Amino acid sequence: MRPLVRWIAAVALPLAVPAVITGALWILPGDPAEIICPPGICTGREVLSARWGLDRGPWGFYTTWLGHAVTGDFGNSWRVAQGLPVRDLVLESLPATGQVVALAMVPLVLGMVASAAGWLPRRADGVWQFVGLIPSVILALGFAAVVQIQFGAASNEGLPALLRVVFAALVLGVADGALADAIVGTRSTFDEEFKQRYAQIATLRGESMLSNALPNVLPALVGQLRARVLAVVSGTVVVEVVLGVPGLGELLWSGTLLQDFGVVLAAAWAYALLSGALLLTQAMAEVAVATWVRAAPPVPERSP
Amino acid sequence: MMAEARPARGPAIALAAVLFAGLAVLAAVAPEFVRTPDLSARYLLPWQSPPFGTDDRGIPLWEVAAQGSRIVLVPAMVAGALTAAAATLAGVARCAGWSWLDTGLQAVGELVGSLPRLVVVLVVALLIPPTWKSLLPIAVVWAFLAAPGAMDEAATTAGRLGGARFVEALKAHGFSAARILLYHVIVLNLRPVLVRQAAEVGMQVVFLEIALSYLAVSRNEPSFTHPDSGYSWATLLYQGYTAALGEPLWHAMALGVGLVAAVATLSRALRAAARAR
Amino acid sequence: MSDLLLELDDLCIRSTHRTLVDGVSFQVRAGQIVALVGASGSGKSVSARAAMGVLDVVPGLQRGVLRYPAVSDADLFATVRGQGEAAQRRLLAETARFRGGYLAYSPQSASSALNPGRTIGRQIQMALARREAPPSDLGGTIAGILDEVGLPPRAAQALPGELSGGMAQRAALAIAIAPSPRILIADEPETGLDPVLRRVVTELMLGVARRRQVALLLISHTADTVKRIADAVVRIGEGGARV
């Protein structure tokens, strides 16, 4: 049942996010067209209104925007990179964010594996938790200062650019309790399972508790991993801006700051698609685990 | 096997009270407007201009700290309270046998819990009218996004008690359903979960404010979380960043880090104070 | 005289609060049915677990000798007596090769003792892997074991949660006998079963043990059962064991 719920949620997310934004636009006081295209910083409101269906009410706007979005048409940016297609800005930003997220998962996955295998002493939990108390913005600031001091203002190519990505990943993988939660959370999951009667009795049968517990803890671990990936994805906004990584988070922030609604909506939708993909992945993993749990050697109907 | 050492509740309660009182006093004495720059009093160290010195504009850092405290205190408490309320509802629904509500909360929680929080916050920040500029709506949104995790934990805790069977068993002892839910379920069993989640969310709101304000300050743009006349703790951290680049503002960095540490310690102390006996 | 398979002498185990067993001694010979009886909390399960090399209380083992004479004359408790948790963990690792192969354990209340995340067939397969020579016809061997305990072949595809209490007990017995052990330790197999099923399960266990020539160490507090089937009875009460 749970995988089915996740499949439905994965499909619903990219539909729900623009729906909620549409709802907010029409609930908030003022003309939606003026919220999207504020007077004084945005011109051509009437053209925008006609293009996006703002003059046809919330349903008109929602269906028009979504219809264009599925074909990759998000219009042009009017503040972040004036005149450039928003689709191009989003696509250009994805590789950097992808690199940061992928690298950030390395310490987290390693931490989970090491914790499950019992390689990390409990005495060290205090260290992970202390480091985890550091907010990501402060840790990112520190690394940004290091790069700035070492390489100066012209530090957006080559080694400095690589370092920015690596540091961004390190911050996301360690700060805000990420690594601590991965290690301690995984261990707690296994500890709770090892307390179950069947796990204790596995020892009496000469089997390992870990191999017996694994099929029962996997769904929980998969869920924890998805939550961690989601937290990392969410955190890319802060670290990309502080460290100057030209990723999706940095694009979203610039769009928000400059009130470039087209960029913000497109970037938010890209994040919703990514979250939906994570949900789908979790659902598929749960189905795979359920299939594995159900595995039994073939047994003939009549015993010899 | 030996039990793990746990922090004593008494000192944790005392520490939490002291830290909270300190932040509340700071918020209470915060000036409405920071005084105008006085370049003759720039970069003064704490012993030259007690208690915390001045920044690169000659503005006393205690005023920045106090304004920052006022910006975050109430929204953080509101967010924590909302999260605790949502978790309470989920825990009670599990124990009261309200399966329709329980299922509904799980379904909504699945969807909401899948959203990248900071992305949602930025979209909300974009939509908020300039006249509403405050941390409070952002904190409420954050609490809404954090609620699924809190509700899940509370429902699980209630489930471990035995859910509706726990309530029925206690009714057989003559207790009313209301007393059972309010005292036995919420006060005795859900309390650690509720306080931990509330403290965690409150802390996250404070750090969120610092992050959002820092990102704005670093681009010389006004923040979403407070009016232009105010200063956030992010200002201290930005000045600390410039200190790393050569400006004599390490005392600003120290104050900023100290305030962050105080908030983190307050969250930990609250969790230790509320743990199950 | 039958072969001596297990010898436990003068066992004394303490926890932080009290003495759990003091002076328990028994032997198990091939083909023999030995019953361990006593009131709840008298130390029957602790003694049985100690006989398998599993000591999980502190300070733990204070006195005692444990031997598996069919394998060697070594006293397995020699380096553990009075040495605390670390020595007991070492013993657990050293005796792991005997558990599931030489000694098998059939738990009480099998429904909660079976792994909920693995099918019965898979659990029997894992138990068969502990034989010296795993069978060439895996499916046929599993079907045969299920038949011995009165379960249909399709039970191999079932998860423990899908079985009734009686079927779960049979499944636990199947998993216990799959490695062809020399000794089967049955821990209160009648717990949670109605009187009819108790008899069925006990007779089943007895039949399997006799057919496979497996010695049976039965932990029970049902006097009728003990009186009916046991070759030797070890009573555990305050002050040690009396046969």
Image (cartoon, coloured by chain):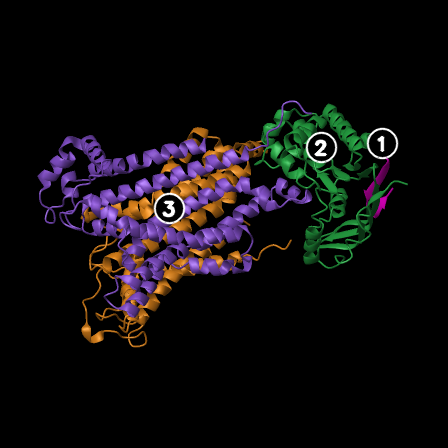
Q: Nearer the viewer, residue B137 or A291?
A: A291
Q: Main secondary structure of the magenta part?
A: strand
- CB atoms at circles 3 and 1 under 8 Å apart? no
Residue C238 located within the stretch drawn in magenta: yes
Q: Position of residue A213 (x, y in %)?
A: 57, 42
Chain A: drawing colour:
purple
Q: Are marks 1 and 2 on the same chain?
A: yes
Q: Amino acid at mark 2?
A: Thr
**What residue range appears in magenta?**
C230-243
B224 or A236: nearer the viewer: A236
Callout 2 secondary element: loop
Q: Quadrant of residue A18?
A: top left
The green-coloured chain is labelled C
Q: Nearer the viewer, residue A152 or C220?
A: A152
Q: Give whichever of discs 1 and 2 has the lower sequence position.
A: 2
Is residue C241 covered in magenta?
yes
- Residue that numbered label 2 is attached to: C191
